[in-house]
Image (cartoon, rainbow, N blue to C red):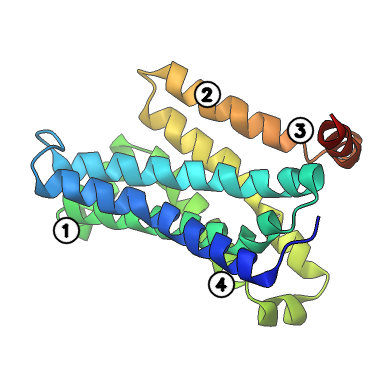
Amino acid sequence: MQTSPRLILLWRVLVFFAALSPLGYWSAQVALGHAGPEPGQYLLLKLGLCALVVLLLTLALTPLTRLTGWRGFTAIRRQLGLWCFAYALLHLTSYVLFILGLDVSLLWDDIQRRPYIIVGALALLGLLVMAVTSNRASMRRLGKRWKRVHSLVYGMLLLVLLHFFWVVRADMAEWAGYALAGAALLLLRLDALSRRLPALGRRLRLR
């Protein structure tokens, strides 16, 4: 499926503003006093959830490309990956700012009460590695190792889901929805299913 460079550029711009819009909305909710009695906790949860959603969307791009043959999905893969890291970093920043009150000495006591913090930190570290190696220079420097480094994304998804599970144990229905989406995306990476996507896409377009 051919697409003009101008349309790809427009698509990338639209994706940029779409990815930015939740942050603007949540900031407005806090500014207007609509974020509940604990706006810091509100931002912490929203930012973490957004990082998970963007991670799932990033993982969906390869199956969508194989299904549709449209290179526009490939064109935004790095962009969405960086947005995922940005929201995860903002999630950490809001934790340090609103939960710890910038007092890092409280961190150890908090980790003992909430061990899922370590799981989240490991996930963020993996996302950092992928973010700093997502450029073309890193691809050239790492060569064949680049794909192995970026296969970390599957492990990061499992860590993020575990982190989220620990946080929202009282509402398993919400977690289960994201977990099922993640499981489906991981299954679509298996060769037996991945190879069938182009043919399925052609059949759907012919209908």
* Residue, disc 1: 103
The residue carrying mark 2 is 177
Residue 116 position (above or below residue 137): above
Q: Which quadrant: the C terminus?
A: top right
Where residue 173 appears, x then y in whole percent? 45, 17
Q: Element under label 4? A: helix
Q: Earlier in the sequence, mark 2 or mark 4?
A: 4
> How far apart are labels 2 and 4 at the CA level?
30 Å
Query: What's the residue at 55%, 47% (across, down)?
Result: 55
Q: Amino acid at mark 2?
A: Gly
Decide which of tag 4 and tag 3 comes sooner along the chain: 4
The residue beneath circle 4 is: 132
For label 3, the residue is 187
Q: With 40 as the anchor, is 63 left or right in this view?
A: right
Q: Quadrant of the N terminus?
A: bottom right
Question: Which of the pair 86/130 is nearer the observer?
Answer: 86
Q: Nearer the viewer, mark 4 or mark 1?
A: 4
How far apart marks 3 and 1 lie (CA) works out to: 42 Å
Residue at (52% x, 21% y) in the render: 176
